[in-house]
Image (cartoon, coloured by chain):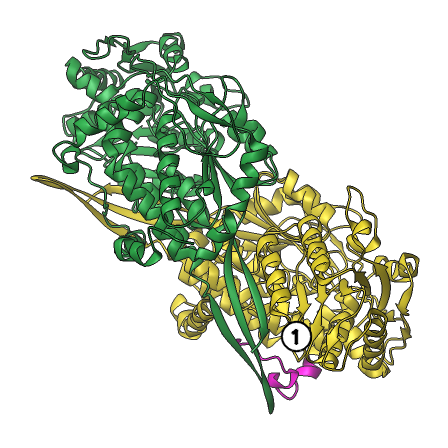
Chain colours: A yellow, B green
Amino acid sequence: MAADLTALQLIEKHRSTLDQALEAIRTRAYWSPHPEHPKAYGESAAGDGLAAFEALRGKQLDLGQPGTDAWVGDEVSPYGPELGVEYPHPDVDVLLPAMRAAMPGWREAGPETRAMVCLEILSRISARTHEFAQAVMHTSGQAFMMAFQAGGPHAQDRGLEAVAYAYVEQVRTPEAADWSKPQGKRDPLNLRKAFTAVPRGISLLIGCNTFPTWNGYPGLFASLATGNAVLVKPHPRAVLPLALTVAVAREVLSEAGFDPNLVALAAERPGEGLAKTLAVRPEIRIIDYTGSTAFGDWLEANARQAQVYTEKAGVNTVIVDSTDDYQGMLGNLAFSLSLYSGQMCTTPQNLLVPRDGITTDAGHKSYDEFVSDLAGAVSGLLGDDARANALLGAIVNPQVRERLESAAGHGEVALESRKVAHPDFPDATVRTPVIVKADGARKVWEGAEPDAAYLTECFGPVSFAVAVDSSSDAVELLRRTVREKGAMTVGAYTTSPEVEQLIEEACLEECAQLSLNLTGGVYVNQTAAFSDFHGSGGNPAANSVLCDGAFVANRFRTVEVRRPA
Amino acid sequence: MAADLTALQLIEKHRSTLDQALEAIRTRAYWSPHPEHPKAYGESAAGDGLAAFEALRGKQLDLGQPGTDAWVGDEVSPYGPELGVEYPHPDVDVLLPAMRAAMPGWREAGPETRAMVCLEILSRISARTHEFAQAVMHTSGQAFMMAFQAGGPHAQDRGLEAVAYAYVEQVRTPEAADWSKPQGKRDPLNLRKAFTAVPRGISLLIGCNTFPTWNGYPGLFASLATGNAVLVKPHPRAVLPLALTVAVAREVLSEAGFDPNLVALAAERPGEGLAKTLAVRPEIRIIDYTGSTAFGDWLEANARQAQVYTEKAGVNTVIVDSTDDYQGMLGNLAFSLSLYSGQMCTTPQNLLVPRDGITTDAGHKSYDEFVSDLAGAVSGLLGDDARANALLGAIVNPQVRERLESAAGHGEVALESRKVAHPDFPDATVRTPVIVKADGARKVWEGAEPDAAYLTECFGPVSFAVAVDSSSDAVELLRRTVREKGAMTVGAYTTSPEVEQLIEEACLEECAQLSLNLTGGVYVNQTAAFSDFHGSGGNPAANSVLCDGAFVANRFRTVEVRRPA
């Protein structure tokens, strides 16, 4: 096949990046090839990106896919404006066979070429990071800088990380081996064996509203790099970032001489529930999903023909036992609670604080003093509207706003939410977080059917300052919460080696990722690709991890052909 | 804890073996540390092994387990004698908590020490290979030499292979990492990260009747090496080999300073169905199963709290298109059909042969001639009773015998089964295989509900010589069989590059392991650890492979603890 981009060109361009990624996942030291700073993308990049985004609005985004039977799309930015972009709606009985037909050539390309093509896709996405940032901002409601970083370089990092894991997993077995078994005095038995990584089938990516690229890229690139075709079913409120991703992927695949139908978009009509239909199609052999526990559980129970990777919901906990940097702790927690209005799967929800207070470098602080000081830290952080807008972004959907507005019903409000006006987008719903006091006595959460509000996930800018009877009670409540509800993150502040050990042991046994004594510029809700694991895969919040061997190993199989040598 | 065996001693003894295993799974060249020849175990080993086996008979095998509420066991050798061994029956509400309590110390030991302890267990099993051979022979019905090799060194190889995969998977992530993220002119962000492989929970091994050790060791050792406790629920007809394994494991764990309850036996009362009860216990987080499709499917659907690894049933196919070694092909096929009376999950069931015959170095052979020649080859191979007994072993259970006896109902019998007398065990049921002619015209197997007998698994010494209209029809039938029924193995004989390519492509697309043109001393039903994959995990016969990264990667999770550096 005539290709504008040959495998050799791609290797020359990207192999060293792949090698650095392979080294990074081995050492887990800091590394990223994708700059975080908007200015790193050139003088005109910001303006060009905004212009490119504006040019998409009100248009049909034609991806050249087979089997398009309608044009759909009704995205409205959480900042107010309707996007007006229309996307192809698939006749799946046409599209799925076309995707299957695309796979043999992709399988034959082998792991290295597939990795190189994936890196070229990521590299072109990287070059358009400003445009993607606008698309992420106006679908997720993230503030611009967060949409830029989390939706751009950090998402690209996670995609590249998945490619690296996928590549190394496939080349653990050699392409060929000579096998010679001694037979004493007789001639040895000699076989020539060939090993080929083969795809599972079509992989379905079910995107989420809040982090369409960050949560979408790992599954997309892990499946593509292992030889599968990938059908992208975005959240209906966050189609554009993934539709652009599909467009870039199709363009690169074509240029590299492969069938563009290896990656396709499945946009849906309002209320269609297309994910549910697609998830049980026999052609779909892998599913990546980020979203509600209810639908994640449904997928795990019903999409039995597929490998299902889910990131669902959890109740994230921070234990506050003691600190030698009280102001640093307050500032760090205030930022964690405020970032993207708590609309991260990693945002702390429950702060467990001993009822009789905590020891700090600023003296003993009672439970009430701590809660009041934390409320003050959040208010201070978000006191200036410009800074508040830059941190909070917009409330992503009406459900989050409803949870925020009903938070007062859960108990005494220690910090009220306030409305923040946005200078550029008057229709945006921008809100500061609320902190609710709660009783963490054992009798409240022990027993068969405890009903405290803090025991279930309350996704959005609502946190609970839970007064517990002791730090060891806090650890018990943490264990129970992780075991029953799951957690993407656990944080803890303590200067006591004994308490630290109790908490570490709880996290090791209940399988939760722990951040200790963060007081500076690293936050419990942020993880870095190539170094931090996102989720543990070992508690109910998620059945998989970004990113480890288990995330990629089941996306392909190895077929052996052996013959006499 | 005072240990008779220190980690250092174990490393000195076994580390180089582990390193060789790691190298073997990387190159997939021939390697084994476990001798195949019975004489390699010493002058007196055969007699000592037989004596040890005889000494077990009629006794209680006390494993020193907590929560034993009864003694059970009613194994009868397929060769006739009752074994009379009694095993502890567990009160699972006592045993499972004791197993959970054993896990933290095992987790803390880390991947290398766990691997070394596993290798010590395997090494002690290896030293008792003759005793295990007797135990396998008198539960599976395998002939002595096969019980010795497949139940001994080959099983130990598969166990060691699983340990190697488990070890390397856990150490892909370092124990600790320093992470330093540049912040332009400001100080970098510095974190110290610790990574710990943590177990899933208790792993349940559900053993099978025919290959208790060979099919049991991979899951047992993969789970143990990744930090889990392992509860072994043997097939009620094949308890002894796994009970001895549990005894050795408990002995080594104790000597190495670990809680022996990390490995325990769950023998059951007749008809108790203990596997079903255990499989849905919340403590059980991993299940390894070999056996019927019905129960495997039940486990996959119902044991939702666990990672489930199944090897079920399939319909194995050999395509006979052409050969340049007709006698070699006939001899090889005859051996494959005869070995252990076809009671291997890898034995060919359907031989697809063009209706108008095949091209060979001995001239053109019609379908009838080929079938007749193959029948003759089997008869010749098994004509001598001593050789027949050495190859066939005994029929493992009444269900297999019934299938054999009703084979004539499926069509014209090309080779009748004959009874073989066993000089040492007059009550043994020894039978030669039957070959049935079948119509492989498209109209028989196309359409929605084809009902040809050869389209479903007929486990045991029954094969079908299926007359197809062409070799390309054979490939289509192969595809359909693999896709719908699964296959552990596919074989093919062809001298045509075109046909070979069609078959290879079918196996790559339908995900089946292919052996081409085997005419010598390697058989389609045998795989070698460290080199061959057993099953593909990508068709209905099995959802996993012995052994690859996917077989081990989900048996543990990695917990990260990060703190400011």
Residue pictured at 63% horizontal, 68% vertical: A515
Q: Main secondary structure of the magenta part?
A: loop
- Between residue B563 and residue B399, name the one nearer to us: B563
State the image coordinates of residue B179 (x, y, percent, origin top left).
53, 76
Q: Position of residue B488 (x, y in %)?
A: 38, 33
Position of residue B175 in the picture relative to residue B491 (left or right):
right
Circle 1 SS class = loop
Residue A484 in view of the camera? yes
Q: Quadrant of the N terminus of chain B?
A: bottom left
Q: Is residue B537 above or below residue A467?
A: above
Residue B409 magenta-drawn?
no
Quadrant including the C terminus of chain B: bottom right
Magenta region, residue range? A29-48
Position of A102 with respect to A324 (left or right) is left
Task: Depth check: give the residue in front, B58 or B494.
Answer: B58
The relative height of residue A277 versus residue A171 in the rendered view (above or below) is above
Q: Taking A140 as reference, is A424 above or below it?
A: below
Decide: is B225 above or below B62.
below
Residue tagged 1: A518
Question: Residue placed farthest to the left in the image?
Answer: A185
Residue B340: where, in percent of width, then height?
28, 23
User: Does A30 appear in magenta?
Assistant: yes
Give whichever of B139, B123 is nearer the camera.
B123
